[in-house]
Amino acid sequence: MLDHQGRPATHGRIAVNGTRLHYVVAGSGEPLLLLHGVPKSLHYWHLVLPLLTPHYTVIAPDIRGFGDSARPDSGYDMRTVSDDVAELVTGLGYSSVKVHGEDWGAAFGYALAAYHPELVEKLSYADMLLPGYGLTEGAYYTPENVKSGHWVWHLNLFALRDYPEMLIPGHDREFWTAFMRDECVNPDAITDEDIDIFLRGCTAPGGLRAILSVYRAAFENSEQTLKNPKLKQKTLGIGASYWLGDEVKRIVSSIAEDWTYVSMDCGHSLALEKPHELTEILLGFFQGD
């Protein structure tokens, strides 16, 4: 993880909310928080980080259970993860941050804005079906979902007790490589080196349990989310045309009062497939009024 001048990001660990998070910080200026998705880690941001550090102090944590953060037995629902991140932000001395999240990182960013509104100045919400607003419905075995190009079939598998734990170990590389690359327009955007780094977390002790725990909290997350009023913060929805696309527009219009939407011509891993385009969009949003 290098900044725009080729300097390594500063690594840190911090005890928060009954667990311990690993994170990196790089750049200077106002703080910008990046939240990765599943089954990834903060390495996901390695291409956009040097594009953002001329403008912001970038903070990128490994979410609880992922990368080099601790893997506690519980606490993988959106509200608990948002509490982790809130304590990280304040523990680093910041009173507020701008936030960009993709996939589950978008859901965690939403939760941070909903449960800790004083900490979030603006929210960028990228390519995620939010629990309560279509996530579980997207897993239904229907002709429409199967033909949609973004049928989230894995929610059903991951919800089953014991079966994923029985089937995935021993085929970790094949499973997670196909899982991530199948969501890309250009599968080569996720390199073998990226796979190696993500797999280090997936196959670490407790790594698979953490992944499954995020998905197994779907109903709990839905109950939480549907109780929340609309966000007051300016919210940008970014939809990947190959993956969720205008579904993101529907979601941000439902969860935020002041929202805009843009589409990117790529698949689900926006920061790896189109890092320069994504950076331009984020700078335009975060630096605008």
Image (cartoon, grey):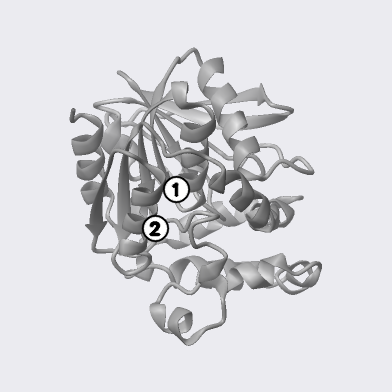
Q: Position of residue 92 (x, y in %)?
A: 51, 16
Q: Nearer the viewer, residue 194 or 286?
A: 286
Q: In the shown orientation, is residue 203 left or right of residue 273?
A: right
Disc 1 is placed on an element classified as helix
Instruction: Say which residue appears at 48% left-offset and 65% top-offset.
Output: 180
Q: Disc 2 marks which residue?
A: 269
Q: Position of residue 137 (x, y in %)?
A: 54, 69
252 w.r.t. 129: above or below: above
Q: Earlier in the sequence, mark 1 or mark 2?
A: 1
Q: Disc 1 marks which residue?
A: 44
Mark 2 belongs to which amino acid?
Ser
Mark 1 belongs to which amino acid?
Tyr
Disc 2 is placed on an element classified as loop
Q: Is residue 133 visible?
A: yes
| Screen quadrant of the C terminus | top left
Around disc 1, counting alpha carbons within 10 Å, would you say few (fewer than 14), some (14 to 19), or many (20 or more)?
many
Q: Nearer the viewer, mark 1 or mark 2?
A: 2
Q: Nearer the viewer, residue 172 or 87?
A: 87
